[in-house]
Amino acid sequence: MHNTKTRAVRPLKQAGFTLIELMIVVAIIGVLASIAIPQYQNYTARAQASEALSITAGVRTDIAEQYSLKGEMPVKADLGLTDDDGNLEAMSGRYVDTVSYADSAISVTFKEDSAIGTKVMNIAPVDPVDNNGVSPGNGWTCAWNDTDTNESWLPSGCKEASST
């Protein structure tokens, strides 16, 4: 008997990933990034815009107090907080450049290096009585000075002006 040893050929085991698998992973990451980056930018802008509410909290309280005492919106002199330029003193922050008060509204200008840019946000009290004679309640509305600014950047602490 003749015994021949046959060599058993084992299939080689795949080591690593194929090019198509890597391309699929890169495509999935690209799609997720294209969704996540704009959402993160909106989140950042909204967080920076909310600084305007915290900076103006004191003057908004003063305005509400003066309104409840006199029954009308106060003028700058009633608040006693304006400097020579007409801006409210000591009201700036990391993202807020200037704050001013005129015509029953607070105008907040943001710094150029913020995610919002040099946009202006107006903060105004909710009308005590709407067109139907119904009081919508207390609160403040926020709106951008221009119409091309993203409305989703408004802080959640403000009631939307369009809903009042």
Image: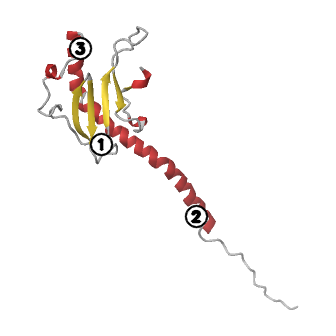
The residue under the point 25% across, 23% down is 103
Q: Indicate which disc residue 22 carries.
A: 2
The mark that comes first in sequence, 3 or 1, is: 3
Above or below: residue 42 compared with residue 133: below
**Amino acid type, mark 3:** Tyr
Indicate the quadrant containing the C terminus: top left, top right, bottom left or bottom right: top left
Residue 96: image x %, image y %? 25, 39
Disc 3, SS: helix
Quadrant of image for the N terminus: bottom right
Horizontal and vertical percent for residue 63? 22, 20
Residues at badges 2 and 3 in contact (C-beta under 8 Å)?
no
The residue pinned by badge 3 equals 67
Residue depicted at x 52% and y 51%: 32
Amino acid bearing label 1 = Thr
Query: Mark 2 is on which residue type?
Result: Leu
User: With 42 as the anchor, is 125 left or right in this view?
Assistant: left
Q: Nearer the viewer, residue 148 or 17?
A: 148
Percent x, y of residue 102: 23, 25
Of 21 and 3, nearer the camera is: 21
Look at discs 2 and 1 and give the one toward the viewer: 1
Residue at 24 percent of width and 12 percent of height: 72
Q: Is residue 113 above or below residue 121?
A: below
Query: Residue 118 has which mark?
Result: 1
Q: Earlier in the sequence, mark 2 or mark 1?
A: 2
Left or right: where does residue 92 sit relative to residue 148?
left
Mark 2 to mark 3 CA distance (whole Å): 64 Å
Residue drawn at x 42%, y 38% as measured from the top left: 150
